[in-house]
Image: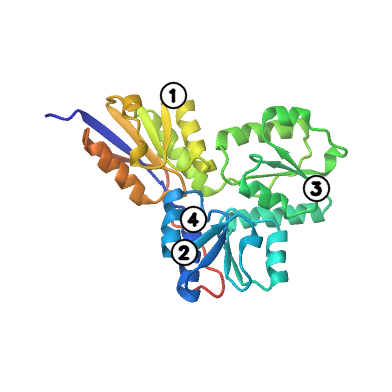
């Protein structure tokens, strides 16, 4: 039987970013140093395959610090944690390693400096996301207000418009955030902006790759977890650029009835998804299509982050 031809257009960059690489390596090195089990507060990154792989090596994932036994080493996830978490670990004498992405930590330090200078922070992000919870936990209650939408901007009630600043979650839609920032600046012309872009390079690069692919493919698959903010944003970017898109965790999740028989298919992966899952999807597609692969490259990523003291080689 002759398989239908399919041009498979794969995004570059895709998959793991430097912060995710670092976080996973921290857990692996902690297991090597201390033996299993190593406790990890919250999913180290939002990807089931990664979490299950680390469980198999000896990691135990918990949601709160009080689930960690006395004397056990613990790792904090890449999304960051409120200040109260390491303080509680110190109070219990727990040894811990902070796998917070350095780009998230940069936002934390900005928040501290802004509040210390008397500013009230308007934080652009998604309610309930671990990164948002962690960032709010860097400053005293009442010093930061969450902004999710343009409607939120219109509804803001502030006491001193001259003492406002904004920061953003690192994994947002570049285009949506630009609209919200423009609305904030229009309503509060004196609002203090961060010196650099808070949305991380990996999020921006993956969204840009999807935009470039959109004119070349009939349909798109995004590999990522349903609780992965940056992966969900890739689906949105594709659909806004006129390409039907679906989020899948693994090859087994491909809905071939929905997929149909496209002539071209775009494939990318969120920053928490390993390359092995990309190749798994390609192999699954190859069972039904005669594939020709090509790559659309939006950027070349060379960033690496240092490991914490005590784990670095």
Mark 2 is surrounded, within 10 Å at the Cα level, by few (under 14), some (14 to 19) or many (20 or more) other residues, namely some
- Give the CA separation, mark 1 to mark 4: 30 Å
Residue 212's tag is none
Callout 2: SS: helix
Query: Which one is in front in this view, the residue at disc 2 or the one at disc 1?
Result: 2
- Give the CA separation, mark 2 to mark 1: 38 Å
For residue 151, above or below residue 133: above
- Give the CA separation, mark 2 to mark 3: 34 Å
For residue 52, above or below residue 287: below
Residue 242's tag is 1
In this view, the residue in front, 23 or 287, is 287
Q: Earlier in the sequence, mark 2 or mark 3?
A: 2
In this view, the residue in front, 202 or 46, is 46
Q: Which residue is mark 2?
A: 25
Q: Earlier in the sequence, mark 3 or mark 1?
A: 3
- Give the CA separation, mark 3 to mark 1: 40 Å
Callout 3: SS: loop
In this view of the protein, can residue 2 be seen by the observer? Answer: yes
Query: Residue 170, percent across and down?
Result: 59, 47
- Give the CA separation, mark 4 to mark 2: 8 Å
Q: Which residue is mark 4?
A: 20
Q: Earlier in the sequence, mark 3 or mark 4?
A: 4
Callout 1: SS: loop
Disc 3 vs disc 4: Cβ atoms closer than 8 Å?
no
Query: Residue 287, percent across and down?
Result: 21, 37
Query: Which one is in front in this view, the residue at disc 3 or the one at disc 1?
Result: 3
Q: Residue furthest right?
A: 159
Disc 1 vs disc 4: Cβ atoms closer than 8 Å?
no
- Give the CA separation, mark 3 to mark 4: 29 Å
Q: Which residue is mark 3?
A: 143
In this view, the residue in front, 240 or 31, is 31
Query: Residue 101, percent across and down?
Result: 56, 57
């Amino acid at each position: 039987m002759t398989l239908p031809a399919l041009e498979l257009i794969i995004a570059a960059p895709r998959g793991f970013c430097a912060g995710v690489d670092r976080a996973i390596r921290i857990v692996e090195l902690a297991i090597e140093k201390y033996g299993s089990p190593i406790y990890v507060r919250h999913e180290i990154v939002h990807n089931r395959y990664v979490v299950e792989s680390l469980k198999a090596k000896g990691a135990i994932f918990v949601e709160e610090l009080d689930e960690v036994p006395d004397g056990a080493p613990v790792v904090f996830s890449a999304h960051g944690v409120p200040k109260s978490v390491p303080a509680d670990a110190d109070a219990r004498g727990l040894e811990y390693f902070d796998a917070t992405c350095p780009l998230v930590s940069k936002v934390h330090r900005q928040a501290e400096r802004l509040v210390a200078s008397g500013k009230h922070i308007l934080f652009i992000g998604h309610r309930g996301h671990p990164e948002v919870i962690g960032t709010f936990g860097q400053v005293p209650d009442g010093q930061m207000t969450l902004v999710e939408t343009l409607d939120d901007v219109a509804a803001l009630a502030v006491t001193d418009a001259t003492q406002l600043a904004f920061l953003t979650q690192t994994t947002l839609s570049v285009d949506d955030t630009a609209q919200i920032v423009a609305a904030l600046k229009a309503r509060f012309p004196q609002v203090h902006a961060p010196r650099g872009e808070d949305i991380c390079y990996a999020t921006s690069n993956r969204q840009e790759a999807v935009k470039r692919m959109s004119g070349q493919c009939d349909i798109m698959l995004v590999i990522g977890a349903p609780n992965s903010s940056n992966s969900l944003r890739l689906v949105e970017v594709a659909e806004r650029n006129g390409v039907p898109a679906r989020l899948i965790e693994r090859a087994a999740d491909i809905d071939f009835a929905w997929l149909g028989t496209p002539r071209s298919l775009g494939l990318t992966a969120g920053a928490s998804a390993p390359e092995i899952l990309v190749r798994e999807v390609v192999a699954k597609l190859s069972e039904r299509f005669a594939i020709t692969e090509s790559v659309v490259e939006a950027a070349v990523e060379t960033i690496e982050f240092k490991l914490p003291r005590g784990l670095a080689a």
